[in-house]
Amino acid sequence: MRWLAKLIYFKILGWKVTGNTNISKNTVKKAVIIAVPHTSWHDFYLAILLRSVLNIKANFVGKKELFIFPFGYFFKALGGAPINRASKENKVAAIAKLFEEKDEFRIALSPEGTRKKVKEWRTGFYFIAQKANVPIIMFTLDFENKQNRISEPFYPTEDMEADFKVMRQFFDGVKGKVSKYS
């Protein structure tokens, strides 16, 4: 299936990947992966293709409404897990615990938390990485240049404001599919 993903990603869609393209070969077996900007449903299949192209395992969470029949089977087969955003459970602690239970675990999240334009990122991904003591790997969804740029692993410090500044700089100038939300 990897050859098919490469054919679609590179030849048919005309995308390229730059930056830390050795992500599958390095020793980062656990990470929080963030994708920005998340402006369209097209981001999902691009991320699934990129995951295959790079030959890495990565899971994701989505609102529970996405996991109803018949789509639930499809999303779960792709590594998805439903999350009840309205519940009072500590989602950060629950996801961080998954890192303890697995030898290899990467979770892909969107810091925006939605496809609409937001002024501030949600902070859950950051606290998950801190609590699980794993790096954050950033990748762009740059539709203007048809490229995914991947960062080196970034370990959060105790200075969230400075860390967010570094992460936001990585995404400067990137245009999503729906440019009014980028």
Image (cartoon, rainbow, N blue to C red):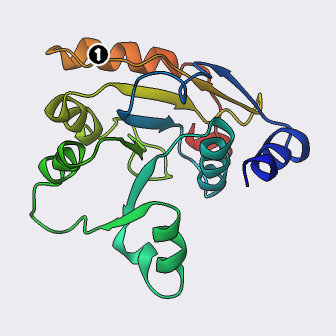
Query: Where does label 1 land, which residue?
Result: 163
Q: Is residue 72 left or right of residue 135?
A: right
Q: Which residue is most to the bottom?
A: 69
Q: Residue 17, position in %: x, y?
A: 70, 27
The C terminus, quarter of image: top right
**Quadrant (top left, top right, bottom left, bottom right) of the N terminus:** bottom right
| Residue at the spot 42% in from the left edge and 23% down from the top edge | 27
In the displayed structure image, the side of residue 174 where residue 157 appears, left or right: left
Q: Position of residue 33 (x, y in %)?
A: 42, 36
Q: Is residue 131 above or below residue 61?
A: above
The residue depicted at 53 percent of the width and 45 percent of the height is: 38
- Secondary structure at badge 1 equals helix
Left or right: 10 with respect to 50? Answer: right
Q: 162 or 178, which lies in front?
A: 162
In front of the other: 81 or 42: 81
Q: Where, by quadrant of the figure, is residue 157 drawn? A: top left
Q: Quadrant of residue 105?
A: top left
How many numbered circles does the render carry? 1
Q: Is residue 24 above or below residue 51?
A: above
Disc 1 marks a residue whose amino acid type is Asp
**Residue in the foreground of this view, choosing between 37 and 140:** 140
86 shown above or below 133? below
